[in-house]
């Protein structure tokens, strides 16, 4: 199923497997204090998801054919940086313990 999320972390299995190489049956592949979804949503990899991450993604809105497209900001890897990506990031706001 294209919308299956086996570990219920908010990242669909096909995207986790194909683009992030994370564990489909566990929400924290590397076993640190930060779950996979928050690590994905933290655009600058500081394990804190905040308005800086949202702003960076919002500044690159558009299709993959746009010169401003940044593949790492296309969270769901659908070829567009859009409200779906912003919604995912917003849903993961906060920092890891």
Image (tube, helix red, strand yellow):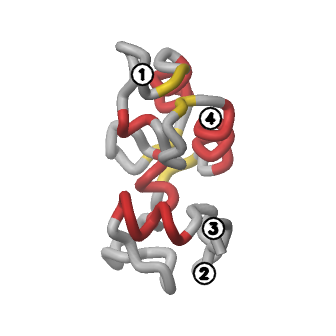
Nearer the N terminus, badge 1 or badge 4? 1
Question: Dot 1: what SS?
Answer: loop
Residue identifier under label 3: 2
Nearer the N terminus, badge 3 or badge 4? 3
Label 1 to label 4, Cα distance in Å?
19 Å
Nearer the N terminus, badge 4 or badge 2? 2
* Residue plotted at (36% across, 28% down): 70
Residue 6 - label = 2
Q: Residues within 10 Å of mark 4 (few under 14, many from 20)?
A: many
Nearest the camera: 44 or 72? 72
Residue identifier under label 1: 65
Q: Can you give x and y, in whole percent of width and height, for residue 84 in the image?
A: 66, 39
Q: Is residue 80 above or below residue 45?
A: above
- The mark closer to the camera, 2 or 1, is 1
Residue identifier under label 4: 86
Q: Residues within 10 Å of mark 3 (few under 14, many from 20)?
A: few
The tally of labels here is 4
């Amino acid at each position: 199923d294209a919308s299956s999320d086996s570990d219920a972390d908010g990242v669909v299995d096909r995207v986790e497997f194909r683009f992030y190489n994370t564990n489909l049956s566990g929400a924290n592949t590397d076993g640190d204090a930060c779950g996979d979804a928050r690590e994905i949503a933290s655009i600058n990899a500081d394990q804190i998801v905040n308005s800086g991450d949202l702003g960076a993604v919002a500044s690159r809105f558009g299709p993959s054919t746009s010169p401003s497209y940044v593949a790492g900001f296309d969270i769901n890897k659908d070829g567009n940086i859009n409200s779906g990506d912003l919604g995912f990031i917003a849903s993961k706001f906060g920092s890891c313990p």
